[in-house]
Amino acid sequence: MSNPRRIFVSVTATLAIAPWLARAQATQSAATLQLGTTTVRIPTPEGFVETSNRAPDVYAMAIAYSGSDTRILAHFVRAEDLNQFEKGKKFIFREFSLALTPRRAESLVVTQAQFDKLRAGTVAMQSQLASKLKPGIAAEVARVSKAVSTAAGSTIKVAVGEIVPVSIDRNDSKVLSYTILVTAGVSEAGGTNTQNLVAGATYCFISGKVIMLNAYRMFRSPRDLQINREMQANWIAGLYAANS
């Protein structure tokens, strides 16, 4: 039987570099969070489960993978995958999602001009994404490897391979959303597990706050790109509906 923890670690390895209107979907629930003096509601994507209460061990591992300059607000996995994990059966987390916020801006009121500058800088970086991220990746991956090893109680080494920008999916005054492909892997005593992932990254501007919605899916065919984009578009719409 596959080691559930190792599979989970492998699939979430890309969290090390994560920091860097469609029809509104039905949602299971929405968590109410306080960011400075602003209240923000984060909806649960349809078919997903938020792990902080249901699966604290899974949530703890996600926290270990979080970037040093962002704070995880919520972590979601597919309900059927979590059921398999809880039963100790052979499984894989095929998809997972994160809501985050930049730590440095959490207590600040971000202006439209500042959000527009963030959008412009992020779009400009896409053509040289791998080279721009490379200087900071080594230190971040080393930090994450140490944090994950501590959380798991064993020596784990995280690796981030090729990063390929795919598309800018939405870019307007409220939202910047883009898709990349990432090769990520984890090595520990049981061997090495490497996965190709679709990573959808979104910056949402709501009530003077920047909310980041990141969605990840195993990449096996171009269809996975479209599925991940559709999930992102629905989640974005749900976020704005929950905060209207």
Image (spheres, helix red, strand yellow):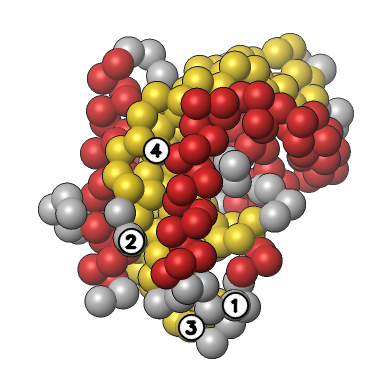
Residue to which mark 2 is pinned: 174
Residue to which mark 3 is pinned: 38
- Comes first in the chain, label 4 or label 3: 3
- Numbered circle sitting on residue 108: 1
Percent position of residue 159, x then y = 72, 22
Front residue (pair 244, 83) = 244
Which of label 1 and label 3 is nearer to you?
1
Alpha-carbon distance for marks 2 and 4?
14 Å
Tell me if 217 is positioned left or right of 186 in this view: left
Q: Residue furthest bottom?
A: 37
- Comes first in the chain, label 1 or label 4: 1
Crowd band around label 3 with a 10 angstrom C-alpha radius: few (<14), some (14–19), many (20+): some
Using the rendered image of the protein, determine whether residue 29 is visible from the camera's viewpoint. no
Q: Residue at x 30, y 38 (%)?
A: 169
Position of the N terminus, as image quadrant, is top right
Front residue (pair 122, 31) = 122
Alpha-carbon distance for marks 1 and 3?
10 Å
Q: Secondary structure at mark 1?
A: loop
Percent position of residue 44, x then y = 36, 58
**Badge 1 amino acid:** Leu
Which of label 4 and label 3 is nearer to you?
4
Front residue (pair 137, 30) = 137
Q: Are discs 4 and 3 less than 8 Å apart at CB?
A: no
Residue to which mark 4 is pinned: 178
**Badge 3 amino acid:** Thr
Q: Give the image quarter of residue 133.
A: top right
Position of the C terminus, as image quadrant, is bottom left
Q: Give the image quarter of residue 28.
A: bottom left
Q: Is residue 28 above or below residue 121?
A: below
Crowd band around label 4 with a 10 angstrom C-alpha radius: few (<14), some (14–19), many (20+): many
